[in-house]
Image (tube, rainbow, N blue to C red):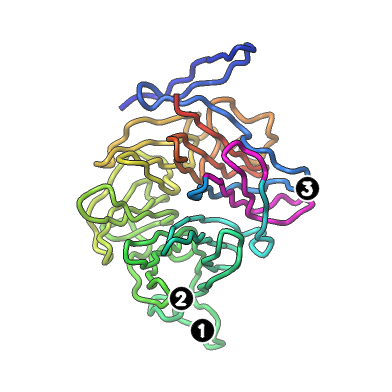
Amino acid sequence: MTGPTLLGSSDKAGAKRPIVGAGEHTYEVFHDWGELPATIQYGNTHGICQDSNGRLYVHHTVHAGSEKHDTMVVFDEKGRFVKSWGKEFEGGAHGLHIRKEHGQEFLYLCDTKRAIVAKTTLDGEIVWSLGYPKESPKYPLDADGKPAVKYSPTNVAIAPNGDVYVADGYGSSFINVYDRDGKFLRTFGGKGSGKGELDCPHGLIVDERGASPVLLIADRSNKRLQAFTLAGEHLAFYQGTNAPCHFHTRERVMVVPDLFARVTLIDRDNAVIAHLGDNGVDSWKDLRAGARDGFPVGRFVCPHGACFDHDGNIFVVEWVEVGRVTKLRKV
């Protein structure tokens, strides 16, 4: 494991940018990446992904002062604004996942405010949406036909066969599974700290780095990763993160945005390779609701989502009230 480092780098003009990491996992830090139009002000920047054409999608809640209310902002690889959409998810925009299916790419979105999961095209056209999982015995209805337990989905993962795994991270800590068409299949997990139990399963991924797919869950309030079979059977716990939020992989390396002020890289065995931009586990408390000019340079406040791009760079979005998108350019 390599410890966090913060060095200086300079270009021909003499401008210095911080460097984080070490060895083959060394990155130059570019905060506030992307040319955001004046009509859009970020709220909490919760999710980010890249499509096959190189475009980056940023999912945010929208700031109260924003002229436009679109929650999805799309950039090209150079950070130039392309388009925006998604005003119907304002205030609840959260999880974000992209997947190619039969030659076409789709986005899977979670809205924690409206408690829905939506599958959309890259232009925001809704293919299907899922609400309260009343088909599950873990999610009863009360006498008035209203939800009897809390449900607030935070993130989505997709199995090779198209099954959809939904993490009820801000609700009752269950994982709900659907087929590719949105038909309910089963529920597992539930709140607790034992094997197979979860406490804020905030993010999840079908990890295909090994011989067979494994469901890896960011068991955030338990401060651990927990692995399951695709049928929902507990396999293992993994330590090394303070408050894991979600995952993305590139070859055999996985990036884990760690809410308590750092980004973690883990290897195929889920052992820590490096912590990037670590600002200290409690540092976020005095920063996340503050002004942008108070954010640390070369360090993180509250990493909430992250992805590798096609070149091996890492993009990080943070749970801060004014939003922040950081590019870690692989050196």
Is the magenta region chiefly helix, strand or loop?
loop
Q: Closest to the observer: 70 or 280?
A: 70
Q: Residue 142 shows which numbered tag?
A: 1
Specify the amino acid type for callout 3: Thr
Name the residue located 32 percent from the left edge and 60 percent from the top edge. Answer: 197
Disc nearest the viewer among 3 and 2: 3
Q: Which residue is mark 2?
A: 133
Most distant residue in the left direction: 211
Determine whether label 2 and label 1 are within 8 Å by CB.
no
1 sits left or right of 142 in the view: left
Q: Residue 69 shows which numbered tag?
A: none
Specify the amino acid type for callout 1: Asp
171 sits left or right of 92 in the view: left
Mark 2 and mark 1 lie on one chain; the one further toward the N terminus is 2
Other-residue count near label 3 (Cα within 10 Å), few / some / many at <14 / 14–19 / ≥20: few
Over which residues does the magenta segment extend? 54-81
Mark 3 and mark 2 lie on one chain; the one further toward the N terminus is 3
Q: Quadrant of residue 285?
A: top right
Point out residue 249 in the picture as x, y percentages from the top left corner. 37, 44
Point out residue 196 in the picture as x, y percentages from the top left corner. 28, 60
